[in-house]
Image: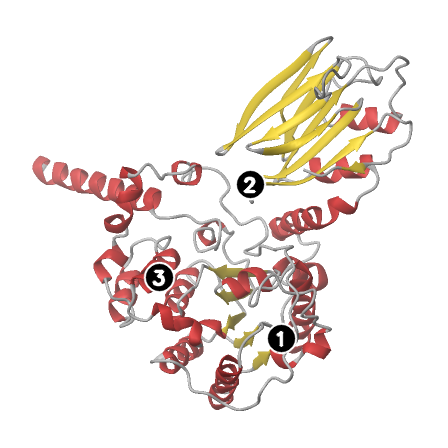
Amino acid sequence: MKKILAALIFFAILAGLFHAANVMLFEKQHFGTAKNIAFEEPQKIDVFFIGASHIFYGVNPMEIWDRTGISGYNLTTHQQPLWSSKLLLRHALKKQSPKLIVLDVLMATNFSRPLLGTDLGSNMTHLALDPVPLSLQKVRGVLETDSIIRKGEMLFPVILSHSRLQQGLLTYDDLHFFSGDRSHPMKGYNYIENRIKYEPPAIVPDTLHELPDGMEEILRDFIRFCRDENLPLLLIKTPLKGNDELYEQINYIGRIAEEEGVPFIDFNHLYEELDFDFRTDLADSGHLNLSGSQKVSRWLADYLSSHYDLPDHRGDSAYESWERSALHYRNLTELRNSTDILSYLEASVSDPYMLTVILCGGKMADPIALPESLTEFFRSAGLPAAPERSGEDAWAAVIRGGKTILEKSAASGILTEEFLVKDTRFVLQVSTREPDGGSYMTALHIGKGGYSSIEPGILIVTYDCFRMEAVDAVRYAFDGSLSAEHLKQ
């Protein structure tokens, strides 16, 4: 019995270590949310939006939440093969009971050709399925999927990804994947502000073109899977700048949807209804920017609320994570329009996914008292060393998700501090000296970028800790008002 028990313990430890290696070593791109779905609260997602990058950038669950209170989530990965969409959804159904599945049909068109029987196809399948833990369900799904070529590697991703350790490619997310909040801060949405102007298509054809090798059967298999699971399904295609063959394939999918009794929304036939503008709403030929995604998501929100019995969860404390995500989304898109320093601080400091750096420096011959509302805010934020008068001492504070992680002050000279957020190094400098030869009064260096001001005042920099990029910076000029001056990086 001792030998049997020892053997069982040995194999349990071995299995645990093997699982840990799989989890730590698989590639965790910022793009895509397959790796995040396990950290969503169970039984909270009412709608899954599934697909590749056209969902990631094109459908915004936060806009839909703000408009309807529907709890949606983008289950996306880069170039997500349609066969892996099914297996990923099957995994998500272990903890979620959605009332609707919305699938973008991009990967049933010519976009799937580079993935069919290729190394690229295997790599994109890995991005979708590597976060899925090994189970009998995953084994059966991989073995039954003809489009997955190297099945052993797909079941044991450490076979492929161990080279990341040898090549020193592990990141903060790899080493800290077992700890912390790994839910996606905007429920799978990521926006682009880039804007490329295109001429709209003269006419979107209404003719048909068959889908590439085997994709019709794979699409019909996904439809059958949803039907067998009693999951209502809606097919969509977000707007894009395509050629006639691509538009005709999308039309062909419309015919498949009609034959299968599944509703299909092709936004490429709704440009006027969306007020979609090819000059302002595309980041590139296929991806929507912030403006484009807002138009599609608001239209889709109204459609979902009028065609499906989906509850409004706004105000429900059980859906607090959607409220936090909506706050973060609003801050990312609206802080740069704020003109009031106090409302700017209140919004950024309360954001659980935001880092707020506040730097106060520079000498003034006649220091003045800061506005009482501003000093009250500093006190309520737990910043005891915050100045009450301008232009005297150097002071710096760093707040992350409402918690102070650094506060320092200095009566004279230059205050310099360094700190890390994930893999990014921040260096802050605050001076009480007069400018000399272009030296900064206040500066925050972020990698190779940053913000600075050579005038006395308060410099506030906001940073998105999930996207790992600066959001905005404002300067408060000690002028007795509460006006905020936005700075360029």
**For residue 130, which quarter of the picture?**
bottom left
Q: Which mark is residue 125?
A: 3
Type of amino acid at the residue the image marks with label 1: Tyr
- The mark closer to the camera, 3 or 1, is 3
Q: Residue at x 53, y 91 (%)?
A: 207
State the residue position of label 2.
468
Q: Residue at x 26, y 62 (%)?
A: 139
Cα separation, mark 3 vs mark 1, equals: 31 Å
- Please, is residue 442 above or below residue 243 in the view? above
Horizontal relation, residue 20 to residue 64: left or right: left
Q: Secondary structure at mark 3?
A: helix
Q: Residue at x 41, y 78 (%)?
A: 219
Cα separation, mark 2 vs mark 3, equals: 26 Å
Q: Secondary structure at mark 1?
A: loop
The foreground one among 350 and 414 is: 414
- Please, is residue 380 above or below residue 392 in the view? below
Measuring from the top left, give residue 35's x and y in whole percent. 43, 51
**For residue 377, which quarter of the picture?**
top right
Image quadrant containing the N terminus: top left
Residue 312 in sight: no
Measuring from the top left, give residue 488's x and y in whole percent. 71, 39
Dot 3 alpha-carbon crowd within 10 angstroms: few under 14, some 14 to 19, many 20 or more: many
State the residue position of label 1.
308
